[in-house]
Image: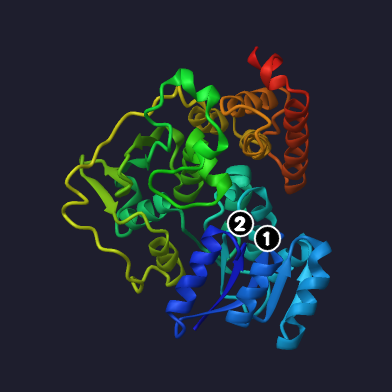
Amino acid sequence: MKNIAILGSTGSIGTQTIDIILAHPDEFRATVLTAGSNVDLLVDQARQLRPSLAVIADQSLYGRLKELLAPLGIDCAAGPEAIADAMARPDVDIVVTATVGYSGLVPTLRAIEAGKDIALANKETLVAAGQLVTDRLSASPSRIIPVDSEHSAIYQCLRGERDAEVERLIITASGGPFRNLPARELATVTAADALRHPNWIMGAKITIDSATMINKAFEIIEARWLFGIGAERITPIVHPQSIVHSMVEFTDGAIKAQLGAPDMHLPIAYALSGTARSHQSRRLSFADMARLDFIEPDYDRFPCLGLAYRALAEGGTTACAVNAANEVANEAFRQSRIAFTDIYRIIDHTLDRMDNIAAPSLDDYMEVNRRARAIAAQAVGSHTAAHCLAD
Protein backbone atom coordinates (compact mmCIF):
# COMPACT_ATOMS: atom_id res chain seq x y z
CA MET A 1 0.00 0.00 0.00
CA LYS A 2 1.41 3.37 -1.07
CA ASN A 3 0.29 6.49 0.74
CA ILE A 4 -0.36 9.40 -1.64
CA ALA A 5 -0.42 13.16 -1.08
CA ILE A 6 -2.20 14.96 -3.91
CA LEU A 7 -1.02 18.51 -4.29
CA GLY A 8 -3.98 20.05 -6.12
CA SER A 9 -6.60 17.31 -5.77
CA THR A 10 -9.47 19.35 -7.25
CA GLY A 11 -7.81 20.05 -10.62
CA SER A 12 -7.80 17.94 -13.76
CA ILE A 13 -4.76 15.80 -12.86
CA GLY A 14 -5.82 15.63 -9.22
CA THR A 15 -9.28 14.29 -9.98
CA GLN A 16 -7.85 11.73 -12.41
CA THR A 17 -5.35 10.67 -9.74
CA ILE A 18 -8.30 10.03 -7.46
CA ASP A 19 -9.84 7.87 -10.19
CA ILE A 20 -6.69 5.73 -10.12
CA ILE A 21 -6.71 5.47 -6.31
CA LEU A 22 -10.37 4.43 -6.29
CA ALA A 23 -9.76 1.88 -9.05
CA HIS A 24 -6.87 0.29 -7.12
CA PRO A 25 -7.81 0.43 -3.41
CA ASP A 26 -5.40 -2.38 -2.54
CA GLU A 27 -2.43 -0.45 -3.95
CA PHE A 28 -3.01 3.21 -3.08
CA ARG A 29 -4.40 5.30 -0.26
CA ALA A 30 -4.83 9.09 -0.29
CA THR A 31 -3.50 10.40 3.02
CA VAL A 32 -3.28 14.11 2.14
CA LEU A 33 -5.49 16.19 -0.15
CA THR A 34 -4.81 19.86 -0.90
CA ALA A 35 -6.66 22.43 -2.97
CA GLY A 36 -6.46 26.11 -3.79
CA SER A 37 -9.96 27.46 -3.22
CA ASN A 38 -12.45 24.80 -4.36
CA VAL A 39 -13.42 23.90 -0.81
CA ASP A 40 -16.68 22.14 -1.69
CA LEU A 41 -15.02 19.66 -4.05
CA LEU A 42 -12.18 19.15 -1.56
CA VAL A 43 -14.77 18.28 1.10
CA ASP A 44 -16.51 15.83 -1.25
CA GLN A 45 -13.17 14.18 -2.02
CA ALA A 46 -12.27 13.95 1.66
CA ARG A 47 -15.61 12.36 2.48
CA GLN A 48 -14.99 9.75 -0.21
CA LEU A 49 -11.32 9.03 0.44
CA ARG A 50 -11.04 9.71 4.19
CA PRO A 51 -7.50 11.15 4.15
CA SER A 52 -5.62 11.98 7.35
CA LEU A 53 -5.37 15.65 6.36
CA ALA A 54 -7.13 18.12 4.06
CA VAL A 55 -5.54 21.50 3.36
CA ILE A 56 -6.98 24.53 1.60
CA ALA A 57 -4.59 27.21 0.33
CA ASP A 58 -7.15 30.01 0.72
CA GLN A 59 -7.06 30.65 4.45
CA SER A 60 -10.44 32.42 4.42
CA LEU A 61 -12.04 29.04 3.67
CA TYR A 62 -10.47 27.20 6.59
CA GLY A 63 -13.52 27.60 8.85
CA ARG A 64 -15.84 26.05 6.29
CA LEU A 65 -13.44 23.17 5.62
CA LYS A 66 -13.01 22.40 9.30
CA GLU A 67 -16.74 22.62 10.02
CA LEU A 68 -17.71 20.25 7.22
CA LEU A 69 -15.01 17.67 7.94
CA ALA A 70 -15.10 17.76 11.76
CA PRO A 71 -17.68 14.94 12.00
CA LEU A 72 -15.32 12.64 10.10
CA GLY A 73 -12.30 13.31 12.31
CA ILE A 74 -10.19 14.51 9.38
CA ASP A 75 -7.52 17.02 10.33
CA CYS A 76 -7.66 20.33 8.47
CA ALA A 77 -5.18 23.11 7.78
CA ALA A 78 -4.91 26.17 5.55
CA GLY A 79 -2.34 28.30 3.78
CA PRO A 80 0.66 27.69 1.51
CA GLU A 81 3.00 26.87 4.39
CA ALA A 82 0.61 24.21 5.68
CA ILE A 83 0.52 22.68 2.21
CA ALA A 84 4.32 22.57 2.05
CA ASP A 85 4.54 21.05 5.54
CA ALA A 86 2.04 18.34 4.59
CA MET A 87 4.39 17.04 1.91
CA ALA A 88 6.87 15.94 4.60
CA ARG A 89 4.41 13.94 6.72
CA PRO A 90 5.51 10.42 7.68
CA ASP A 91 2.28 8.96 6.26
CA VAL A 92 3.18 10.13 2.74
CA ASP A 93 5.18 7.93 0.34
CA ILE A 94 4.46 9.67 -2.97
CA VAL A 95 3.59 13.29 -3.69
CA VAL A 96 1.55 13.95 -6.81
CA THR A 97 2.26 17.54 -7.79
CA ALA A 98 -0.95 18.23 -9.69
CA THR A 99 -1.18 21.98 -9.16
CA VAL A 100 -0.81 24.42 -12.03
CA GLY A 101 1.83 27.13 -11.97
CA TYR A 102 4.61 28.39 -9.71
CA SER A 103 2.71 27.41 -6.55
CA GLY A 104 4.00 23.85 -6.93
CA LEU A 105 7.66 24.76 -6.42
CA VAL A 106 7.99 25.15 -2.66
CA PRO A 107 5.89 22.07 -1.75
CA THR A 108 7.89 20.00 -4.23
CA LEU A 109 11.16 21.18 -2.69
CA ARG A 110 9.80 20.28 0.75
CA ALA A 111 8.92 16.79 -0.51
CA ILE A 112 12.45 16.38 -1.89
CA GLU A 113 13.95 17.45 1.43
CA ALA A 114 11.80 14.81 3.14
CA GLY A 115 12.91 12.11 0.69
CA LYS A 116 9.49 11.51 -0.87
CA ASP A 117 9.03 10.17 -4.38
CA ILE A 118 7.33 12.67 -6.68
CA ALA A 119 4.89 12.03 -9.51
CA LEU A 120 5.46 15.32 -11.28
CA ALA A 121 2.62 16.86 -13.26
CA ASN A 122 3.48 20.46 -12.36
CA LYS A 123 5.93 21.33 -15.14
CA GLU A 124 6.39 24.88 -13.82
CA THR A 125 8.45 23.49 -10.92
CA LEU A 126 11.28 22.55 -13.28
CA VAL A 127 10.62 25.43 -15.65
CA ALA A 128 10.97 28.07 -12.95
CA ALA A 129 13.78 26.51 -10.92
CA GLY A 130 15.18 23.50 -12.75
CA GLN A 131 18.76 23.91 -11.52
CA LEU A 132 17.68 24.32 -7.91
CA VAL A 133 15.39 21.30 -8.01
CA THR A 134 18.10 19.20 -9.68
CA ASP A 135 20.64 20.22 -7.04
CA ARG A 136 18.24 19.32 -4.24
CA LEU A 137 17.49 15.95 -5.84
CA SER A 138 21.18 15.10 -5.96
CA ALA A 139 21.28 15.28 -2.16
CA SER A 140 18.04 13.36 -1.56
CA PRO A 141 16.77 9.79 -2.00
CA SER A 142 13.75 11.26 -3.80
CA ARG A 143 13.12 10.41 -7.41
CA ILE A 144 10.89 12.16 -9.90
CA ILE A 145 8.69 10.13 -12.23
CA PRO A 146 7.07 12.40 -14.83
CA VAL A 147 3.32 12.46 -15.32
CA ASP A 148 3.07 14.71 -18.37
CA SER A 149 2.21 12.39 -21.23
CA GLU A 150 5.20 13.59 -23.28
CA HIS A 151 7.74 13.15 -20.51
CA SER A 152 6.23 9.87 -19.38
CA ALA A 153 6.64 8.66 -22.98
CA ILE A 154 10.30 9.71 -23.06
CA TYR A 155 10.88 8.14 -19.63
CA GLN A 156 9.44 4.86 -20.91
CA CYS A 157 11.47 4.97 -24.14
CA LEU A 158 14.70 5.55 -22.21
CA ARG A 159 14.28 2.61 -19.84
CA GLY A 160 16.98 0.04 -20.47
CA GLU A 161 18.93 2.33 -22.80
CA ARG A 162 22.42 3.80 -22.31
CA ASP A 163 22.64 7.57 -21.91
CA ALA A 164 25.59 7.77 -24.30
CA GLU A 165 23.47 6.27 -27.09
CA VAL A 166 20.71 8.89 -26.93
CA GLU A 167 20.87 11.26 -29.90
CA ARG A 168 17.83 13.47 -29.23
CA LEU A 169 14.41 13.69 -27.64
CA ILE A 170 11.43 14.37 -29.91
CA ILE A 171 8.49 15.95 -28.08
CA THR A 172 5.15 15.80 -29.85
CA ALA A 173 2.55 18.57 -29.79
CA SER A 174 -1.04 18.46 -30.95
CA GLY A 175 -0.74 22.01 -32.30
CA GLY A 176 -3.76 23.06 -30.24
CA PRO A 177 -7.01 24.50 -31.58
CA PHE A 178 -5.32 27.07 -33.86
CA ARG A 179 -2.88 24.81 -35.70
CA ASN A 180 -4.52 25.55 -39.06
CA LEU A 181 -5.83 29.04 -38.35
CA PRO A 182 -4.34 31.78 -40.56
CA ALA A 183 -1.92 33.96 -38.60
CA ARG A 184 -3.90 37.11 -39.36
CA GLU A 185 -6.89 35.69 -37.45
CA LEU A 186 -5.04 34.85 -34.23
CA ALA A 187 -5.42 38.40 -32.88
CA THR A 188 -9.20 38.05 -32.77
CA VAL A 189 -9.67 34.60 -31.26
CA THR A 190 -11.42 34.42 -27.90
CA ALA A 191 -10.71 32.47 -24.75
CA ALA A 192 -13.69 30.25 -25.55
CA ASP A 193 -12.09 29.46 -28.91
CA ALA A 194 -8.76 28.66 -27.28
CA LEU A 195 -10.36 26.38 -24.70
CA ARG A 196 -11.70 24.02 -27.38
CA HIS A 197 -8.75 21.67 -27.47
CA PRO A 198 -9.16 19.08 -30.23
CA ASN A 199 -7.76 16.09 -28.31
CA TRP A 200 -7.26 16.60 -24.60
CA ILE A 201 -9.52 17.54 -21.68
CA MET A 202 -7.39 19.73 -19.41
CA GLY A 203 -7.68 22.64 -17.02
CA ALA A 204 -8.25 26.14 -18.43
CA LYS A 205 -4.73 27.48 -17.86
CA ILE A 206 -2.90 24.59 -19.50
CA THR A 207 -5.39 24.53 -22.39
CA ILE A 208 -4.59 28.17 -23.18
CA ASP A 209 -0.88 27.33 -22.85
CA SER A 210 -1.41 24.59 -25.42
CA ALA A 211 -3.07 27.07 -27.77
CA THR A 212 -0.09 29.46 -27.59
CA MET A 213 2.31 26.48 -27.62
CA ILE A 214 4.12 27.87 -24.59
CA ASN A 215 3.11 24.61 -22.96
CA LYS A 216 5.46 22.88 -25.42
CA ALA A 217 8.19 25.42 -24.61
CA PHE A 218 7.79 24.52 -20.95
CA GLU A 219 8.00 20.82 -21.80
CA ILE A 220 11.29 21.40 -23.63
CA ILE A 221 12.68 23.16 -20.55
CA GLU A 222 11.33 20.44 -18.28
CA ALA A 223 12.87 17.72 -20.46
CA ARG A 224 16.25 19.40 -20.24
CA TRP A 225 16.21 19.03 -16.44
CA LEU A 226 14.43 15.68 -16.20
CA PHE A 227 16.74 13.89 -18.63
CA GLY A 228 19.93 15.97 -18.48
CA ILE A 229 19.96 16.64 -22.22
CA GLY A 230 20.86 19.99 -23.80
CA ALA A 231 18.26 22.10 -25.57
CA GLU A 232 19.96 21.55 -28.95
CA ARG A 233 19.05 17.86 -28.65
CA ILE A 234 15.35 18.39 -27.85
CA THR A 235 13.06 18.80 -30.86
CA PRO A 236 9.33 19.60 -30.90
CA ILE A 237 7.14 18.21 -33.68
CA VAL A 238 3.43 18.79 -34.31
CA HIS A 239 1.46 15.55 -34.29
CA PRO A 240 -2.27 16.37 -34.59
CA GLN A 241 -3.55 12.89 -33.69
CA SER A 242 -1.92 12.85 -30.20
CA ILE A 243 -1.32 9.10 -30.54
CA VAL A 244 2.49 9.21 -30.43
CA HIS A 245 3.18 10.91 -27.12
CA SER A 246 6.91 11.43 -27.73
CA MET A 247 9.97 9.70 -29.18
CA VAL A 248 13.65 9.13 -28.57
CA GLU A 249 16.20 8.92 -31.39
CA PHE A 250 19.40 6.95 -30.77
CA THR A 251 22.90 7.25 -32.18
CA ASP A 252 22.37 4.33 -34.58
CA GLY A 253 19.38 6.10 -36.17
CA ALA A 254 16.72 3.98 -34.44
CA ILE A 255 13.70 5.80 -32.99
CA LYS A 256 11.55 4.49 -30.15
CA ALA A 257 8.06 5.92 -29.74
CA GLN A 258 5.43 5.49 -27.07
CA LEU A 259 1.88 5.33 -28.40
CA GLY A 260 -1.41 5.34 -26.56
CA ALA A 261 -4.87 6.84 -26.37
CA PRO A 262 -4.93 10.50 -25.23
CA ASP A 263 -5.79 9.59 -21.64
CA MET A 264 -3.89 11.00 -18.66
CA HIS A 265 -4.92 8.10 -16.43
CA LEU A 266 -2.19 5.96 -18.00
CA PRO A 267 0.86 8.13 -17.18
CA ILE A 268 -0.58 8.90 -13.73
CA ALA A 269 -0.97 5.21 -12.91
CA TYR A 270 2.47 4.42 -14.37
CA ALA A 271 4.09 7.00 -12.08
CA LEU A 272 2.15 5.99 -8.96
CA SER A 273 2.88 2.29 -9.38
CA GLY A 274 6.60 2.82 -9.86
CA THR A 275 6.42 1.96 -13.58
CA ALA A 276 4.22 -1.13 -13.20
CA ARG A 277 1.47 -1.36 -15.80
CA SER A 278 -1.52 -1.94 -13.57
CA HIS A 279 -4.18 0.37 -15.03
CA GLN A 280 -6.30 -0.47 -18.06
CA SER A 281 -7.26 2.22 -20.58
CA ARG A 282 -8.87 2.34 -23.98
CA ARG A 283 -6.87 0.23 -26.43
CA LEU A 284 -5.69 1.72 -29.70
CA SER A 285 -7.07 0.10 -32.81
CA PHE A 286 -5.28 -0.11 -36.15
CA ALA A 287 -7.82 2.43 -37.37
CA ASP A 288 -6.55 4.86 -34.74
CA MET A 289 -3.03 4.44 -36.11
CA ALA A 290 -3.93 4.42 -39.80
CA ARG A 291 -2.73 8.00 -40.20
CA LEU A 292 0.01 9.59 -38.10
CA ASP A 293 1.04 13.06 -39.28
CA PHE A 294 4.18 14.92 -38.21
CA ILE A 295 4.59 18.60 -39.09
CA GLU A 296 7.36 21.09 -38.34
CA PRO A 297 6.13 23.75 -35.87
CA ASP A 298 5.65 27.32 -37.07
CA TYR A 299 7.74 29.52 -34.77
CA ASP A 300 6.52 32.70 -36.46
CA ARG A 301 2.84 31.99 -35.81
CA PHE A 302 3.56 30.61 -32.35
CA PRO A 303 6.51 32.65 -31.03
CA CYS A 304 5.98 31.42 -27.46
CA LEU A 305 7.51 28.10 -28.52
CA GLY A 306 10.86 29.77 -29.14
CA LEU A 307 10.97 31.04 -25.56
CA ALA A 308 12.20 27.60 -24.48
CA TYR A 309 15.48 28.01 -26.31
CA ARG A 310 15.92 31.62 -25.21
CA ALA A 311 15.35 30.67 -21.57
CA LEU A 312 17.73 27.71 -21.69
CA ALA A 313 20.41 29.68 -23.55
CA GLU A 314 20.32 32.54 -21.03
CA GLY A 315 19.92 30.24 -18.01
CA GLY A 316 19.62 31.62 -14.49
CA THR A 317 16.22 33.13 -13.72
CA THR A 318 15.07 33.74 -17.29
CA ALA A 319 12.72 30.74 -17.38
CA CYS A 320 11.29 31.75 -13.99
CA ALA A 321 10.45 35.18 -15.40
CA VAL A 322 8.90 33.62 -18.53
CA ASN A 323 6.70 31.41 -16.39
CA ALA A 324 5.59 34.26 -14.13
CA ALA A 325 4.74 36.61 -16.99
CA ASN A 326 2.88 33.84 -18.80
CA GLU A 327 0.73 33.07 -15.77
CA VAL A 328 -0.34 36.73 -15.62
CA ALA A 329 -0.90 37.03 -19.37
CA ASN A 330 -2.74 33.69 -19.58
CA GLU A 331 -5.18 34.76 -16.88
CA ALA A 332 -5.67 38.17 -18.47
CA PHE A 333 -6.54 36.54 -21.80
CA ARG A 334 -9.01 34.21 -20.12
CA GLN A 335 -10.63 37.31 -18.61
CA SER A 336 -10.81 38.96 -22.07
CA ARG A 337 -8.50 41.77 -20.95
CA ILE A 338 -5.90 41.21 -23.67
CA ALA A 339 -5.76 39.62 -27.10
CA PHE A 340 -4.37 36.15 -27.74
CA THR A 341 -1.34 37.56 -29.56
CA ASP A 342 -0.62 39.87 -26.61
CA ILE A 343 0.39 36.90 -24.45
CA TYR A 344 3.76 36.61 -26.17
CA ARG A 345 4.20 40.38 -26.25
CA ILE A 346 3.69 40.65 -22.50
CA ILE A 347 6.21 37.90 -21.81
CA ASP A 348 8.75 39.51 -24.13
CA HIS A 349 8.06 42.93 -22.57
CA THR A 350 8.65 41.47 -19.11
CA LEU A 351 11.91 39.75 -20.06
CA ASP A 352 13.26 42.99 -21.51
CA ARG A 353 12.77 44.63 -18.10
CA MET A 354 14.22 41.85 -15.92
CA ASP A 355 17.83 41.32 -14.84
CA ASN A 356 18.93 37.70 -15.14
CA ILE A 357 20.52 36.16 -12.04
CA ALA A 358 23.00 33.52 -13.19
CA ALA A 359 23.21 31.41 -10.01
CA PRO A 360 19.97 32.06 -8.11
CA SER A 361 18.95 30.94 -4.63
CA LEU A 362 15.38 30.05 -3.71
CA ASP A 363 14.93 33.61 -2.43
CA ASP A 364 16.13 34.91 -5.80
CA TYR A 365 13.60 32.77 -7.64
CA MET A 366 10.84 34.01 -5.36
CA GLU A 367 11.80 37.64 -5.92
CA VAL A 368 12.07 37.19 -9.69
CA ASN A 369 8.66 35.52 -9.71
CA ARG A 370 7.18 38.44 -7.74
CA ARG A 371 8.80 41.16 -9.85
CA ALA A 372 8.02 39.53 -13.21
CA ARG A 373 4.38 39.19 -12.21
CA ALA A 374 4.27 42.85 -11.22
CA ILE A 375 5.76 43.97 -14.55
CA ALA A 376 3.39 41.77 -16.54
CA ALA A 377 0.38 42.88 -14.48
CA GLN A 378 1.29 46.52 -15.03
CA ALA A 379 1.52 45.88 -18.76
CA VAL A 380 -1.92 44.29 -18.76
CA GLY A 381 -3.43 47.00 -16.59
CA SER A 382 -2.10 49.90 -18.62
CA HIS A 383 -3.10 48.25 -21.92
CA THR A 384 0.47 48.45 -23.14
CA ALA A 385 -0.23 45.26 -25.02
CA ALA A 386 -2.10 47.45 -27.48
CA HIS A 387 0.68 49.93 -28.10
CA CYS A 388 4.09 50.06 -26.37
CA LEU A 389 4.49 46.27 -26.22
CA ALA A 390 4.60 46.19 -30.00
CA ASP A 391 8.10 47.75 -30.01
Residue at point 54%, 33% (across, down): 312
Image location of residue 157, percent across then percent down? 31, 54
Residue at point 73%, 45% (across, down): 361
Which residue type does callout 2 highlight? Thr
Image location of residue 110, percent across then percent down? 68, 63
Residue 247 shown left or right of residue 19 in the figure: left
**Residue 239 vertical position relative to residue 376 in the rendered view, above or below:** below
Q: How is the image coloured?
A: rainbow
Residue 151 shown left or right of residue 372 in the figure: left
Question: Which of the image's four quarters has the C terminus?
Answer: top right
Which residue type does callout 1 highlight? Pro
Q: Nearer the viewer, residue 284 or 163?
A: 284
Residue at point 36%, 51% (across, down): 154
Report if the CB atoms under discs 2 and 1 are less than 8 Å apart. Answer: yes
Image location of residue 327, percent across then percent down? 65, 40
Q: Nearer the viewer, residue 307 or 58?
A: 58
Q: Nearer the viewer, residue 80 or 49?
A: 49
Badge 2: residue crowd in 10 Å (few <14, some 14–19, many ≥20): many
What residue is shown with label 1? Answer: 107
**Can the viewer see residue 333 in this picture?**
yes
> Where on the picture, by quarter, is residue 365?
top right
What residue is shown with label 2? Answer: 99
Residue 350 shown left or right of residue 159 in the figure: right
Local SS, label 2? loop
